[in-house]
Image (cartoon, coloured by chain):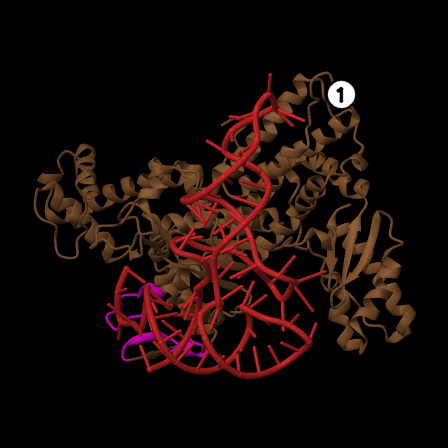
Amino acid sequence: MTPAELSARLLMSANHVLVAQHGDSAPTVTAADVGLERPRNRDHGDWSSNLALKLAKQLGANPRDLANAFAEEFRGIEGVASIDVAGPGFINVTLDAAAAGALAKTIVDEGTHYGANKTLAGQTINLEFVSANPTGPLHIGHTRWAALGDSLARVLRASGAEVASEYYINDAGNQMDNFGASILAAARGLPIPENGYPGEYITQLAGAVLELQPDLLELVDDAALDAARELGYTLQLGEIRASLERFNVHFDVWFSERELHAAGDGEGTPSAIDAAIDRLRAQGHVYDEDDAIWVRTTDFGDDKDRVIRRGNGIFTYFAADAAYYLSKGDRGYAHKIYLLGADHHGYVHRLRALAGAAGDDPDTDIEVLIGQLVSINGAKLSKRAGNIIELNDLQSWLGTDALRYSLGRYPADSPLTLDPELLQKRTNDNPVFYVQYAHARTSNVARNAAASGVDRSAFDPSLLSDETESALLGLLAEFPRIVAQSAELREPHRVARYAEQLAGSYHRWYDTCRVTPLGDEEVGDLHRTRLWLNDATGTVLRNALGLLGVSAPERM
RNA sequence: GCGCCCGUAGCUCAGCGGAUAGAGCAAUUGACUACGGAUCAAUAGGCCGGGGGUUCAAAUCCCUCCGGGCGCACCA
């Protein structure tokens, strides 16, 4: 019996009791009110409900009395072994082994689909993350968003949402010119220009550009700058894409800012930015002042209005943001999620205002997630301090799995301090190995079982009576809710924490319950049934690791 | 000055208002002639930054103070 099924039965019984007690004036109870959860302490049963505590006040009843009334009814539910009322009015449910154990077969049958749920069905979500300027390599800050964003996309999809993961390429504006000028200077053997980009990678890019364009140094300045910028851009963006793919991070859409600036095909066709300003103006949140065009973002909680087109006719960055936002809606995404670093949190109000000015609901149509920055041994990352670590370096030290995992197991709003020496050691203090080993162990047990003639030809869940087995089954049952919760709260790290718990539970079970017979012992239904449980655990570990973008090895 | 995030074991961090606050690492001690010891069992380690409040119940919600990070452009 899955927790969802149990919850539904409890709900029915609870409503039955309430109607019996209060007739037509009985309060309506929903699944959320049942509040079914795994108690920390196993002495409190397999599942626990605080329903009576929640209802006692509005009914003016004593919580323990109410709990006892519910308990009486709950005892009749099939598959329930016992019901206890404890503490201030908790209702503790213990399932009989057969009802609890049946889940093992369900999981094996569902395979890769187990854990998927429909809580976000029908939602169309545009999820933007990383979006680093294509003027240099990705560093550890971007890497954190890459890991979290990609896992978030997977968790959202697993919960039924239709998701586009998107990378916004800031390929318009001064920074690109500074980037091109830096490459050109390096190609010419000159020092870095003012506002230019330092770094060894610029020199390397200059070399690569020269190979593609051998006559670069003979071109006149404008042409040379164009060539350096454009070729450098292509090469650098290619590097970024390759790094991300190696990191198991996939983007459905790579959106170029230049598209927003470009005029349409025909003569006089407005650019996406022009069109966006017109649309905002039509909504009544745009005004002209001091030769500039403004958006009244203060209508939506911003602390000052924002210029969208400067007095000199040049658009601000905000203009592209506006056009980009509208583009997301036009492409069919009702819900837009932005994953930004804390150094960008000043944008939250204006982005929300943008949604409002566009006629959307700032509270539901846009969501800005702010992630805290990574620091190295307490020092913040900066180019000046020389402690910027690139994605590629991290990957070569740790490997994709360990890196994805060590960044993905913390919530985005938690400040994260990393020790590069520790990262390079690849030691067991990264729990990814603990989880992966548990998975490898399930594979190994399955191999041994096959070699000993244990197969899945029988399944008698009432035999799964060891306390490590009921603990393991309880955790397996929670997986779909963990996935749904991770999606709903936008906290994919919950999947990692869950996987660690599950791995621990599995290791403890392995230690006490054998799948393959010992010595001359004959193969029995206990062995066969345990094989189902073993395989179910492997399935859930594999699914959980998959949501994190981490591999599930069969051997280590 | 204003705003957002954070403060939990020696370290790195979990903990959508619930019961005795947890994990990994580090420390100490045990367990392989039993599916791989990258494992398991046990011990030790905490005024959950301080102080008020709401609640049957607060690490969790509210207020306030302290400490740390980040941000407050006709830059991108």
At horizontal 72% and vertical 34% (from top left) the residue drawn is A109
Near-viewer residue (A287 or A34): A34
Q: What stretch is highlighted in magenta?
A: A290-318
Chain letter of the brown region: A
Q: Where is residue A126 in the image (x, y as percent from the top left)?
A: 50, 54
Is residue A254 within the magenta segment? no
The answer to whether residue A407 is above or below residue A204 is: below
Callout 1, which amino acid? Val
Residue A110 position by quadrant: top right
Q: Chain B is drawn in which colour?
A: red
**Is residue A136 among what the camera can see?**
yes
Placement of A102 over or under A299, stated as above or below: above
Nearer the observer, A494 or B49? B49
Q: Nearer the viewer, residue A50 or A172?
A: A50
Q: Nearer the viewer, residue A508 or A338?
A: A508
Q: What element carries label 1?
A: loop
Q: What chain does mark 1 sit on?
A: A
Instruction: Provide the residue designation for mark 1.
Output: A523
In this rendering, is residue A281 above or below A71? below
* Position of residue B53 measured from the top left corner of the image (x, y, whole percent): 57, 83
Residue A364 in which image quadrant? bottom right
